[in-house]
Amino acid sequence: RENIPGLMALSPRLRKSPYFERTIEHDVCEFTVYNRMLMPLYYGEGFDVEYKALTEDVAVGDVAAERQVELLGPDAHKLAQQLTCRDISKVRPGKCVYTIMTDDDGIVVNDPVLLKLAEDRYWFSIADSDVLLWAKGIAIGQNLDVKVFEPDVSPLAVQGPKSKSLMSDLYGEELVDRLKYFDFAHGEETMLLGKIPTLLARSGWSPELGYEIYLEDSSYGKEL
């Protein structure tokens, strides 16, 4: 689409998020490239309007470029621990933690959020670098019994003082009330409209009260 700002010269190898068409409908003005994906930077109403929404109301942002790297299998915990210098031995399922990844010289590779879905299943919600290949390399080198892959998961940020009210409308007050900072809910109770599979985390890039909806089926991106 040649009329989309900033896209004419971009490589077709850059991926669009499941929310791409909605960002176009809401007058996105520019994109950046993050994890080889197009990520919206700002919208037509301007930064002051977005800032007011974030600090006084509720703001919704396409952060699908926070790609997930999933570790699944008997050695998932062992690999997760090798990938971060943080002690994750006491992290329980249903909890997010901030995890710095470094190489053997202590140089930062990435600073993702780790989500523990089960004892043998983890997601790293990554910043901008290729963690998938890094994790696969370590798993192969250590001969670990773990599958490392990118699942069909696309986060959507909902941030601001009124975000809790919005999430309560979507998921119910009981579920949202029990989520403490960096907790998440997953499974049947976070299935929206009886068909859209999501994970709901109380997390986000902003310092405001906020949540991230991890959509687990990109075909529902526009509807979500």
Image: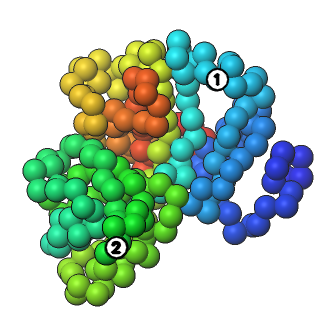
Q: Nearer the viewer, residue 125 or 105?
A: 105
Give SS at disc 2: loop
Please tell me which of labels 2 and 1 falls first in the chain. Answer: 1
**Image-quadrant location for residue 100:** bottom left
In the displayed image of the protein, which residue is found farthest to the right? 3
- In the displayed structure image, the side of residue 12 where residue 223 appears, left or right: left
Label 1 amino acid? Glu
Q: Residue at x 17, y 70 (%)?
A: 78
Label 2 amino acid? Asp
Q: Residue at x 76, y 43 (%)?
A: 30
Q: Residue at x 59, y 49 (%)?
A: 18
| Colour mapping used in the image | rainbow
Disc 2 marks which residue?
A: 105
**Image-quadrant location for residue 190:** top left
Q: How many marks?
A: 2
Residue count near mark 2 (Cα–Cα under 10 Å), binned few <14, some 14–19, many ≥20: few
- In the displayed structure image, the side of residue 186 where residue 164 appears, left or right: right
In the displayed structure, would residue 164 be above or below residue 74? above
- In the displayed structure image, the side of residue 31 where residue 139 appears, left or right: left
Place of residue 1 in the rendered image (x, y in percent of width and height, measured from the top left): 85, 52
Residue 140 - label:
none
Q: Nearer the viewer, residue 31 or 4?
A: 31
Place of residue 86 in the rendered image (x, y in percent of width and height, measured from the top left): 22, 56
**Image-quadrant location for residue 172:** top left
Examine the rendering and report whether any part of residue 166 can be seen: no
Disc 1 marks which residue?
A: 50
